[in-house]
Amino acid sequence: MAFNFEALTPDFMWYALESIGIRAESGLLALNSYENRVYQFIDEDKRRYVVKFYRPQRWTQQQILEEHHFTLELLEQDIPVAPPCLINGMTLHQYQGYYFALFASVGGRQFEVDNLDQLEGVGRFLGRMHQVGQAKPFLHRPTMSLEEYLYQPRKLLNNSPFIPSYLENSFFSDLDRLIDQLEQHWTEPKSIIRLHGDCHPGNILWRDGPMFVDLDDSRNGPAIQDIWMLLSGDRQDKTMQLDIVLEAYSEFSHFDTNQLKLIEPLRGLRMVHYMAWLAKRWNDPAFPIAFPWFNDAKYWENQVLAFKEQIATLQEPTLSLTPQW
């Protein structure tokens, strides 16, 4: 069943917060979030908070709590994450059908992907995060799979009204070629751990060190999933960045270098999954406003080119670490 956030008026959110003993004194400032609704405010004691209202029917109560417990585990090990606040002995609250959680507002600058010192710091704390993550798996949250990231999105795109009719044949032909290549290059990782899950630079703030935010997509998967999105530029740049990240990472966690061959398959999975995610959420009014280009023919033409480029990239040698002498 489709769901929208129309009920989340300022009054509704104020009463939801009041139901757990929090009185918002300032207005509720919307922050960038599309899957959920996230707002910053100041309470009557001048404390700055962020409240997240979870998209109903996406995660179960058990799955959300598993994310919260993982975040609190990380915090106990002095790993810089933004944890949910414990109020009345609970981190997850419910008001008229909506689950919501409160977080202390954390400030910081945007993580600079081309700052090698910052990259080293992120690698070090990712190693520590994964040391905690490998202690036990998630029981209720999903494990990364071709089914979730490839086959279900392919089925959804097949019924999508967004792809221009003149482009359908070439789009689906190249998409299926990409899927075939991804199947050939995908190998099930031997080690599956609890991950941040969406560790792109936008989910890392920088203060005296990194601050990891938004573990909403946390799940079981290979360690490389939390690393590959930190790499950018040409092959030489990516190799240098990978060296820096993994040298720092390895101070705390062993990294299986066999997972390096999953970098480009994971990039391909994200490409397909992202398109399907936008199509699936398009009826949410926030999406056409935030992603107006998605309903433009030029976007879909560019995706056909992107499929071809990713197929070619999959044929290239796997990214590897610089030999140590």
Image (spheres, rainbow, N blue to C red):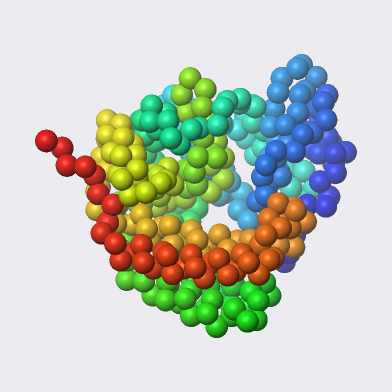
Left or right: 68 as drawn, with respect to 221: right
Q: Residue at x 45, y 32 (%)?
A: 74
Q: Residue at x 61, y 25 (%)?
A: 107
Left or right: 84 as drawn, with respect to 227: right
Q: Residue at x 48, y 43 (%)?
A: 199
Q: Residue at x 83, y 24 (%)?
A: 25
- In the rendered image, the quadrant that contains the N terminus is bottom right
User: In the rendered picture of this protein, how many numbered marks are placed on residues?
Assistant: 0
Furthest-left residue in this view: 325
Residue 241 lies, in percent from the top left, at: 34, 39
Left or right: 321 as drawn, with respect to 63: left
Furthest-top residue in this view: 45
Residue 321, quarter of picture: top left
Residue 294 lies, in percent from the top left, at: 66, 62
Residue 167 lies, in percent from the top left, at: 59, 78
Residue 308, quarter of picture: bottom left
The one nearer the camera, 62 or 82, is 82
- In the rendered image, the quadrant that contains the C terminus is top left
Furthest-right residue in this view: 11
> Is 297 drawn above or below residue 63 in the view shown?
below
Instruction: Answer yes or no: is residue 134 visible.
Output: no
Left or right: 309 as drawn, with respect to 1: left
Instruction: Answer yes or no: is residue 177 visible.
Output: yes
> Is 287 drawn above or below residue 112 in the view shown?
below
The one nearer the camera, 216 or 157, is 157
